[in-house]
Amino acid sequence: MSSAPTTLFSPIRIGDIDCANRIFMAPLTRCRATPGGDVPNALMAEYYAQRAGAGLIVSEGTQVLANGKGYMNTPGIYSAEQESGWRLVTNAVHQRGGRIVAQLWHVGAISHPDLQPDGAQPVTATEGFNPGGITRTPRGKVERGPARALSTDEVRSMVGAFRHAAEVARRAGFDGAEIHGANGYLIEQFLRDSSNQRSDAYGGSIDNRIRFALEVVDAVAEVFGASRTGIRLSPVTLANNAKPDSNAQATYGALVEALAARGIAYVHFIEGNTGGARDLTGFDFAWAKKRLGEAGVTYIANNRYDRILAMHTIAHGAADAIAFGVSFLANPDLPERLRRDAPLNPPRPKLFYAPGAEGYTDYPAL
Ligand SMILES: Cc1cc2nc3c(=O)[nH]c(=O)nc-3n(C[C@H](O)[C@H](O)[C@H](O)COP(=O)(O)O)c2cc1C
């Protein structure tokens, strides 16, 4: 008996999630939630439904707490109103036969008091950590400042906040959850020794620095089951001014081993610098693919894939699925276009984070 070769267009079962193809939609913040309560709405449901042809949609980052927010009008996933809003989105995607997981997000120090409840200081791993850079708040462009360290008890509460968000996501009808452990946000602030100088059980040794991430994984897996829990990692990115870990191979290698042991659904890797060069120096992604594969954990690859690179990568078994960001944003029917080798709509970056339907739901299908 011969079986057909695996291609980008082959179905795949990830944990307990059946995906029609291996062309996934990467998480993309679009800042279209309804202001006030950061509530997902009908426009967002339409946008995601248009993209339901993806094997799997990873939602935009959705903050697990009000103080996890780092940009204006990003949706939350902690209130009853947000749960109802997300229900619109998951229903719309499921009606079109799609699958969608929620990306659970806390930005940590990447926030600003203007975006915090009661103008509070943002929280992070290390007292005074300041990632720098500019962000937009209702006052306009402002510089980020120093964040305050979470106490040990507060770290434990933060794990509880991720658990609560997973419960909201499950009730809202998501097929699973992806923990945002990438791009310089709170979990990555704990992982790297460049942003974690704690002296409690969550800092210092590698085992201590990966502890918060693993406690969050375990909490989310308690809600969804390990077979519907994934995590996104970016071992070598410098996104959001993140500084490299002094030994990314050792730190992220230990994390990959622990994730393999837990048998979660997937690990989603940003290969190289997010949205930038595919320079893989510093971490052995091929090793991670092999190690996770031995444990039955799916390896999702992302970062600047085009049709040819994606097809080769799947054909050679270097990844199990490919997540597309900007090209999915601009092409609601991306899988069909890749199948036919059809031309792609150009993205309109000025409208990535702008309010309204323009540059959001108006990208044409073939
Ligand atoms: C507009 C925009 C918003 C993004 N929002 C998120 C996000 O919410 N969560 C996340 O993990 N990555 C986010 N990213 C990163 C993308 O998921 C992806 O890693 C990046 O665009 C590289 O993939 P690509 O070359 O296929 O676009 C965002 C990228 C863009 C361009």
Image: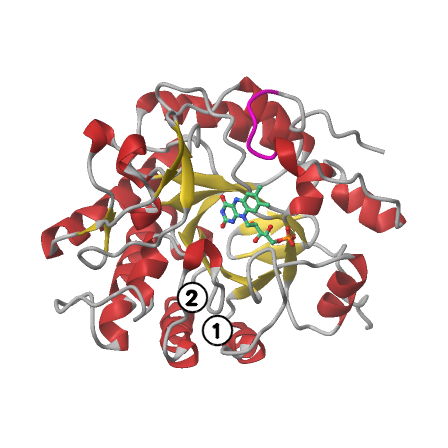
Question: In this rendering, would 67 be left or right of 200?
Answer: right
The vertical placement of 87 against 272, above or below, is above
Q: Is the residue marked 2 within 8 Å of ligand 1, measured from its CB?
A: no
Residue 117 screen position, x and y as percent: 23, 29
Residue assigned mark 2: 263
Name the amino acid type tagged 1. Answer: Ala
Q: Earlier in the sequence, mark 2 or mark 1?
A: 2
Disc 2, disc 1: CB below 8 Å?
A: yes
Q: SS of the residue at dot 1? A: loop
x 47%, y 37%: residue = 174
Identity, as a three-letter code, of the amino acid under mark 2:
Gly
Q: Residue 105: horizontal and vertical position, in percent? A: 38, 45
* Secondary element at tag 2: loop
Circle 2 packing at 10 Å, graded few (<14), some (14-19), many (20+), is some
Seen from the viewer's position, the closer of residues 279 and 106 is 279
* Side of 207 where 266 appears, left or right: right
Q: Which residues are magenta?
A: 352-356
Residue 306 in the image: x percent, y percent? 75, 57
Q: Is residue 133 above or below residue 189?
A: above
Looking at the image, which is closer to me, 86 or 331? 331
Look at the image and tell me in which quarter the N terminus lies: bottom right
Reading the image, the residue beneath label 1 is 295
Residue at 81%, 66% (x, y): give it.
4
Residue at the location (68% across, 43% down)?
328
Q: Position of residue 47 (x, y in %)?
A: 63, 28
Is residue 170 at all visible to an observer of this figure? no
**Residue 168: mark in rendering:** none
Disc 2 versus disc 1: distance between alpha carbons? 6 Å
